Each structure stands twice: as C-alpha cells, then as structure tokens.
Image (cartoon, rainbow, N blue to C red):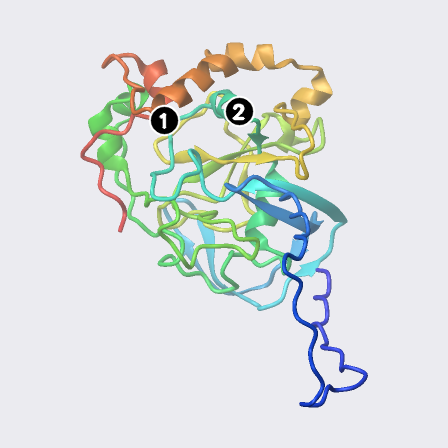
Amino acid sequence: PPRPAPPPVALEPTAAPTAAEPQPPPPESAPKAPSEPSACPADMKLVDGTYCTEVDQKCLKSWHDKSNDKKICEEFEPKTTCIGDKVKKRYCIDTYEWPNTKGERPEVMNRFHQAQVKCAAVGKRLCTESEWTMACEGPEMMPYPYGYVRDATKCNGDHPWDGPKMEKVGARDPKELARLWRGVRSGSQPACISAYGVADLPGNADEIASNEQKPGSKRANFDSVTTGGPWYKGVRNQCRPKIYTHDEGFYYYYLSFRCCAEPDGKPTDPRTPQQIAKGWTMDRVERLAQFTIGQMREKLELKKQGKCDCPEKNILCKTMCGTLLGPNAVDGR
C-alpha cells in the first residue's frame, strides 16, 4: 500500500511581531476561494489507491463448518502481502447497499440485469469484483474492513440457517421473505465501515458484482459474481472471497447490490466489462431485466413521493419498487 504522507509541519515566522507592533486590520470582504468540485456525488465514497490482484493473508486460527464444508478463519496474521500485480484504481462507490439510503433496509431479490438497470437509472453501474474488494479491504488490504480478527457483531453475521421454503421464495411470498430476513438497516453498524468510508460490505446482505476474470477461464462463465457473504454462520463473510457459480438469473432473499461510478464528473458506462467486450447494448440488458432505464426512473420518482404501489401479484412491479419484503420482517439485531 502507498506510504502515508508525512504530517504537515508548521513553518516558523521569520520574525515574531512584538506587542508594540500594530497589526494590519483584516480586509472587509476577503474574496472566497472557489470550492473544489467533489470527485463523487454526496451519496458515494471515493476510492483512490492501489489494488493488488493476489494477496497472501496467513490464517492463525480457524474452524471447519460442516454444513458448508468450509474453513472459517477467525484470526489472520496482522499483515497482508501483495504477491500479485498492483493496479491503480480511482472510482466512486455507493456508501450503502441499494437503495443507498441510511436507515433503509438493503433491497434484495434482484436478478443481475435488474440490479444493473437500477444502477443505470441513477447514472451509475454495478461495481466490478475488484472495486468491491478494494473498497472493503482498504489501503492495508485487510481481510475484514475492521481488521484481521473476525467479529460477527461488527458486520452482521453468524445467524443460524433457517431452512428457506424455495417454492415460496420463488413465488416471492412476502411472509416467507419476512420470516427469512435477518438483515439490518444500512448505516446501523458503526464498526462495519472500511478505511474508505464504505459501510456494510461483508456480512449482512450478500452482494452482486460484475465479473473481471480472464475470458475462457472457469470463473468467467457468468457475468455475475457474488461477494461479501450473507448473514449466516459458516460462510465467506470476508472482503476477498467470491462465488462464480451463480448465473445472471440468480436472485435470493439475502442478495443485494450496490453501485459504482466514474469519478470527477466523467461519464459512466452502465455496461459490465464482459458486456463491453462482447459489444452488448443496454437495450439487450433491459430486455433481460424486463424493464427499461426510463421505466425504472419513473418508479424511483414514484417511490420518492410514496406512491410506488403495486397490485398484490405483480412481482415485477414489486421488484422495481423494492416492496417484496413482507411487513412482519424483523431486523437481525
């Protein structure tokens, strides 16, 4: 990681004024320096630094989760070594999961292309997997945004498995989605904030990101990547681990997303790296999402007015409005 800049040093005056020396009065109206435009919108954080493509993080203490057949590291050596390539990155990332509003619940049950169109509707795009990882790890490339020792009380996790009834999940049954909900509201975890100021990255709701793996490799089969891990025990509630086996049609009761954008007022292409390489247009993405950017903007405007109402069985409308979760949902803590 880059070395921190040295602290500013106050310069000594060439000659200290004596008490008898009169001081010039301040100007009546000093001209104000023009304020610098922010690199990112107010609801986003700037990530500017170096990303490492492969790191060495030594686990000191772990246990094995039988249900997932997975090694869970409880404590890492407090040092991360970059053993891959170093890549300069500068971008903006949403502070919270969609709808990116403090105090709201992260929205779940969106398919990949639906999440992508939602980001495009607000002038953003889905984050790439490396952007998500870098925002989580911070400049020191830590395994958790808060350090090297796992703590599920900082980033909501370790809830027991509760046996989803998949027929009801598939039907978007609001009572079943409410029963399964163990998430917490965005911004309610003061210790789950990365060095870049991004909140709620690992744990809580799992998240969608776009794939950057080498074309033709086993991990490049799908554009969709899931990252961060959900609120359960025995899963990858860490910054770097990813899942590459869910296709773009995957949705789930704990799966959310957040958006990224280019900094400094630069235009943001809402397409993913894979889509750009294949020459996709956003028309194709909209067809897969089953709604357009314009239609999503209309829903967002209605939502601002508290009028994003849908017929009871209109799943697509509820997906757009983010109102699939039943009223009896109870937050995880």
Query: Residue visible at 36% across and 26% down?
Result: 304
Could you say where residue 318 lies in the image, as x and y percent from the top left?
Answer: 32, 19
- Amino acid type at circle 2 is Gln
Q: Determine which residue is flagged by label 2.
A: 116
Quarter location, residue 105: top left
Q: Nearer the viewer, residue 106 or 208?
A: 106
Image height of 112 relative to 49, above or below: above
Q: Determine which residue is flagged by label 1.
A: 304
Could you say where residue 158 lies in the image, as x and y percent from the top left?
Answer: 34, 52
Image height of 317 relative to 77, above or below: above
Gap between marks 2 and 1 measured at Cα: 20 Å
Q: Earlier in the sequence, mark 2 or mark 1?
A: 2
Quarter location, residue 330: top left
Q: Secondary structure at mark 2?
A: helix
Disc 2 crowd rating (10 Å Cα; few below 14, some 14-19, many 20+) is many
Q: Nearer the viewer, residue 246 or 157?
A: 157
Query: Residue visible at 60% across and 15% down?
Result: 282
Image height of 171 relative to 201, above or below: above
